[in-house]
Amino acid sequence: MKMKHVKAITAGLMIALGSILVSSCSKDDPQPAPERQLSPAETLASTAWETTNAKNNQGSNVPLSDANVANFVGFAYFKTNGTFTMYNLDNSPKMRGDWSVPPDGKTRTIVAKNAAGETLFTRVVEITVLTKTEFTYRIYPDNSNKSVYYDIVHTPTQHPEP
């Protein structure tokens, strides 16, 4: 009779252990918190960017050496403190200054400055894509003709700031 009790106790323990294991895998376990959505400005500042493509208003690729887009090609580093630096693809300095993106993420403004901190120019561009994997803005060779434009496409880069 003792063997029956041992078997019954063992069976009971196995059922209890199985219940514990099953309940520990239930859907009531806390799930990881969803990743916080970045603001457009935080997204722009979250990585270094490299110009990797340009497209014309017909959607065709334009060589980065094309005179219409060549001045917009390079590496861009947007810092969280509102300053930026840009370099040509050969790492030569291009410009620096201040930048901003409004909460709606529709435009990016840069204020290029010289070494003395004096404003050289201000450029506002329309943002067409701003995600963690792509930053694209539109330029118009002639601001009075919005039918001709070029989209300047950037992707994240691990390229260290020169």
Image: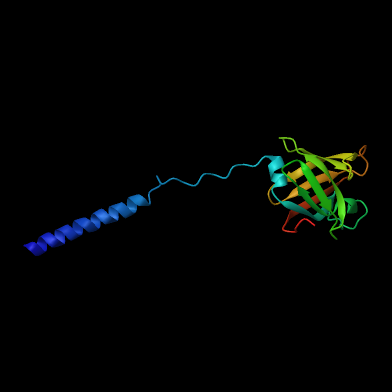
Which is nearer the eye, 141 or 162?
A: 162
Residue drawn at x 44%, y 45% is 30
Q: In this view, does 5 lie to the left or right of 55?
A: left
Residue 99, image x, y percentages: 79, 41
Give the farthest residue toward the front.
116
Quadrant location of residue 28?
top left
- Quadrant for the N terminus in the image: bottom left
Whether residue 57 is visible here, answered yes or no, is no
Residue drawn at x 92%, y 44% is 141
Which is nearer the eye, 34 or 95?
A: 95
Query: Where 121 sits versus 52, above or below?
Result: above
- Quadrant for the C terminus in the image: bottom right
Quadrant location of residue 3?
bottom left
Which is nearer the eye, 26 or 86?
A: 86
Residue 122, image x, y percentages: 87, 38
Residue drawn at x 89%, y 54% is 70
Residue drawn at x 90%, y 51% is 71
Residue 64, image x, y percentages: 86, 57
Whether residue 3 is visible here, answered yes or no, is yes
Task: State the scheme by which the image is colored.
Answer: rainbow
Quadrant location of residue 121?
top right
